[in-house]
Image (cartoon, rainbow, N blue to C red):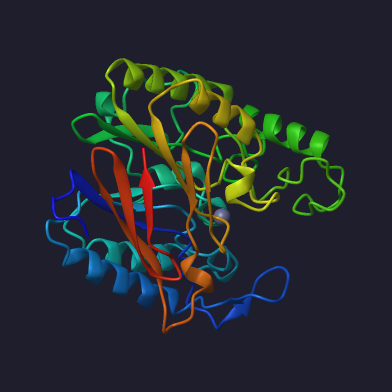
């Protein structure tokens, strides 16, 4: 660790996917998923974060906090309550991204009224996007000249929306156009393999809002950390796990100076890439595929010219210069 104290620090964790269920395997049948134990790993992370000195400013929960299994077992509300009870032991705010597994369990309307709705009410959320009122997209400034932007990677998705809503129909039309497979979760043969139902995309309204937020940050000479459930750079992900229109989000970022880092979850193996514009893309290893003698969380210490990630368990330490 550096001698000088950081400007601020925050915790990161992704893909807890808790369910009170026996261990299982991923869709390929080779990765073990430790559903029940993931809650204990979350607890370990919370205990470690709570002892940090100086204290953290906040924690980012990068989505998929409970598993889709809960919906089939009628245990969604109970599982969420358990995860939130663990997180409530933190003395700092938790910011939540929404992933596909939140949307397997809950409608957007329900999520907006749940403990996973961390968007501040009113003006604090920043310039509102006219058509993006129910997205979990907002920004905040944890320290002078720094900003964090949360993006909603399932704004454009069939998950969590009413089948008769215009957004649902728009998402389904786009998905079917790009994915002719019977099973819309199957990427076989696709030219753009990210067009599967377990991913989603950013609406134009959200991209316009994002562009405006970054324009203001440029103007105020801020450094910006952007985060969302889905990775947006192919070199920090596999080709299937990306946001549908990841190129559009990337081109918004690249048309501004201010963004230093993009944090994502969803791809349980994790990934990292420093792109040609100097943006660090960090995809965090998922808790759900982590055995009990390890873990997968980290603390990021932010300095004027760099961020230092101290990883635990499967997450490696890393220095990311601006
Ligand atoms: Zn996911």
Q: Say left or right for 224 vs 208.
A: left
Q: Position of residue 88 (x, y in %)?
A: 24, 61
Q: Position of residue 208 (x, y in %)?
A: 50, 19
Q: Position of residue 239 (x, y in %)?
A: 70, 49
Residue 176 figure quarter: top right
Q: Position of residue 6 (x, y in %)?
A: 18, 48
Residue at left offset 44%, top offset 60%:
65
In the image, is residue 146 above or below residue 86?
A: above
Residue at left offset 56%, top offset 46%:
231
Q: Say left or right for 321 vs 197.
A: left
Image quadrant containing the N terminus: bottom left
Residue at left offset 84%, top offset 53%:
188
In the depicted view, which residue is nearer to us: 300 or 199?
300
Image quadrant containing the C terminus: top left
**Ligand 1 location (quadrant):** bottom right
Residue 166 figure quarter: top right
Residue at left offset 28%, top offset 62%:
87
In the depicted view, which residue is nearer to us: 17 or 48?
48
User: How many numbered dots are placed on residues in this image?
Assistant: 0
In the image, is residue 66 above or below residue 56?
A: below
In the image, is residue 96 above or below residue 292?
A: above
In the depicted view, which residue is nearer to us: 207 or 147?
147
Residue 292 figure quarter: bottom left
In the image, is residue 100 above or below residue 141?
A: below
């Amino acid at each position: 660790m550096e001698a000088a104290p950081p400007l601020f620090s925050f915790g990161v964790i992704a893909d807890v996917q808790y369910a009170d269920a026996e261990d299982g395997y991923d869709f390929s049948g080779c990765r073990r998923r430790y559903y029940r134990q993931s809650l204990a790993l979350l607890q370990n992370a919370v205990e470690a974060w709570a002892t940090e000195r100086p204290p953290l400013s906040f924690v980012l929960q990068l989505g998929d906090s409970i598993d889709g299994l809960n919906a089939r077992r009628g245990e969604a509300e109970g599982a969420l309550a358990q995860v939130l009870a663990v997180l409530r032991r933190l003395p700092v705010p938790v910011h939540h991204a929404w992933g596909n597994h939140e949307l397997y369990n809950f409608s957007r309307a329900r999520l907006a009224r749940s403990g996973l709705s961390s968007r501040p009410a009113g003006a604090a959320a920043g310039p509102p996007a006219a058509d993006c009122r129910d997205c979990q997209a907002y920004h905040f400034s944890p320290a002078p000249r720094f900003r964090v932007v949360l993006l909603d990677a399932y704004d454009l998705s069939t998950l969590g929306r009413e089948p008769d809503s215009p957004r649902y129909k728009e998402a389904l039309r786009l998905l079917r156009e790009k994915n002719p497979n019977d099973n819309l979760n199957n990427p076989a043969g696709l030219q753009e393999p990210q067009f599967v139902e377990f991913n989603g995309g950013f609406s134009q309204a959200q991209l316009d809002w994002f562009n405006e937020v970054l324009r203001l940050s440029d103007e105020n000479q801020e450094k910006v950390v952007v985060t969302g459930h889905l990775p947006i750079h192919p070199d920090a992900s596999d080709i299937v796990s990306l946001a549908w229109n990841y190129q559009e989000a990337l081109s918004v970022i690249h048309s501004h100076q201010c963004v230093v880092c993009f944090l994502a979850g969803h791809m349980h193996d994790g990934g990292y890439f420093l792109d040609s514009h100097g943006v660090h893309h960090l995809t965090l290893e998922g808790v759900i595929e982590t055995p009990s003698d390890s873990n997968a969380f980290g603390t990021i210490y932010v300095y004027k010219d760099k961020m230092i990630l101290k990883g635990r368990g499967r997450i490696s330490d890393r220095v990311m210069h601006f």
